[in-house]
Amino acid sequence: MTRTRLSARLRTRARARTALLCAALLAATVQTTAVSPAFAGGPGPDDRDCVRTRGPLDDQAREILGIARRTKDELHLKAVQLRVTIDGREVLTDALGESMTNVPAEPDMHFRAGSVAFAHIGTALLQLVEEGRVSLDDTVERWLPRLPNARKITLRMLATNTTGLHDYVTDPAFLAELSAHPFRQWTPKELVGYPLRHPFWYAPGTSWSYSHANYVLLVAALEKITGMRIDEFVERRITGPLDLRETQNNFTPDIPRPVLHAFTSERGLYEESTFWNPSWTTAPGAVITTDICDLARSAQAIGSGELLSHRAYRTLLDPGTVGLGGATATCPATVCLKQTPAKHFGLGVIVINGWVLQNPSFSGYAAIQAYLPSDRLAIAVSATKTATTPDGNMAEQVAERIAAALAPDTPLAIG
């Protein structure tokens, strides 16, 4: 395959991934009344090991497992890890398929969690606001003086994707470099350089558009505000208090053992991508791995506002994005997505029909953490691909079908 054909294919896949995110937001139906945080406890000392559910399964667990098996077969998935809890209590934990050929997938295998870090960072930022250390409406020129429009861009805008910055992940020049050098170590300056080659989509704060650059910049600001590295800040504020022992930042492409291996066809051939360098996904210190049990606990805690006041939790679900977005002369509708009471992005989270979630998908890894506050229901899924798996985040497909069985009146309608 020539470089020209490969680049075209990569651009097509990038547009497809962007379209999936768009679909997730456009399909959302959000409850208009904020749900009070549920302060359910985490796993007890006897539940620390992330293993398959012990003992005979009850009817509900068997139904969930059957859904996961059928979906895995239908979508030709290589592996599926899943954990479902209600009110913090385990309903089912399991793993299906293979990590590698003849190596069974296990629940305790670690995988890359991507944008789950944004949910953690957003919650930690709201804690700082509650303490009076910053305001969401503080402009960032004190911490990011060289950023264009720094006197107009606020912490809220960075955290809610309302700055108007382009997304480097959809930039053809970036995609070509990433494809040619999947093991490259990227710096924040290099990543943000791509969006800054383009004019802003809109005046900061006047619309909505997704850009990975926003969280690269937000991390830089938070490190200056707190005087701490972002991994230390999040560990102190989020992963430590929640006892997420298997969730950690990685400054290198390594993954703690045991590892769920990933595979992808993004470069035109089916190949292993487990240790491709993830430094392009966000800022150093926020590139995380986790296991399925920690992902379910994260879903419950972030989705219920366990670490926030009621007021901050309401801001997490709707930080002012409602009413923004929509096509303009300078920004197409596929980029500036309309944010309505039924369809909007929160502060580091996505809200879909009352579900609070994050859905990372990159370099062969796909996952979702989703929480339905009204039912105190947490669903966590991780999935990897075979050569014939459809494009997109297939962990979402597994989660949607489980949600349809457990909460039929509140569909997790992402696609």
Image: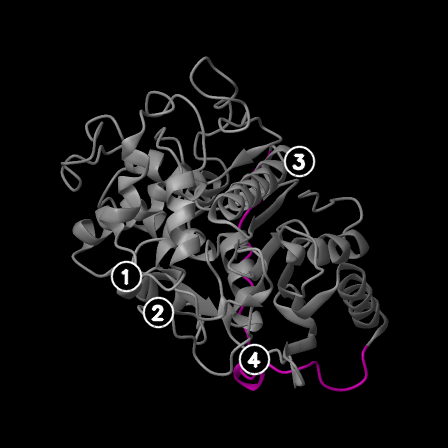
Horizontal and vertical percent position of residue 325: 49, 23
Q: Is residue 248 above or below residue 314?
A: below
Amino acid at the residue labelled 4: Asp
Of residue 33 and residue 176, the one placed in the foreground of this image is: 176
In the rendered structure, which segment of residues is drawn in magenta? 33-57
Amino acid at the residue labelled 1: Phe
Q: What is the quadrant of residue 57 in the picture?
A: bottom right
- SS of the residue under disc 4: loop
| Foreground label between 4 and 2 | 2
Q: CA distance from mark 4 to mark 2?
A: 18 Å
| Foreground label between 1 and 4 | 4
Q: CA distance from mark 3 to mark 1?
A: 34 Å
- SS of the residue under disc 2: loop
Quadrant in which the C terminus is drawn: top right
Amino acid at the residue labelled 2: Asn
Q: Are marks 1 and 2 in contact (CB under 8 Å)?
A: no
**Looking at the image, is mark 3 or mark 1 earlier in the sequence?**
3
Horizontal and vertical percent position of residue 340: 57, 26
* Secondary structure mainly formed by the magenta segment: loop
- The residue beneath circle 4 is 108
- SS of the residue under disc 3: loop
**Looking at the image, is mark 4 or mark 2 earlier in the sequence?**
4
| Foreground label between 2 and 3 | 2
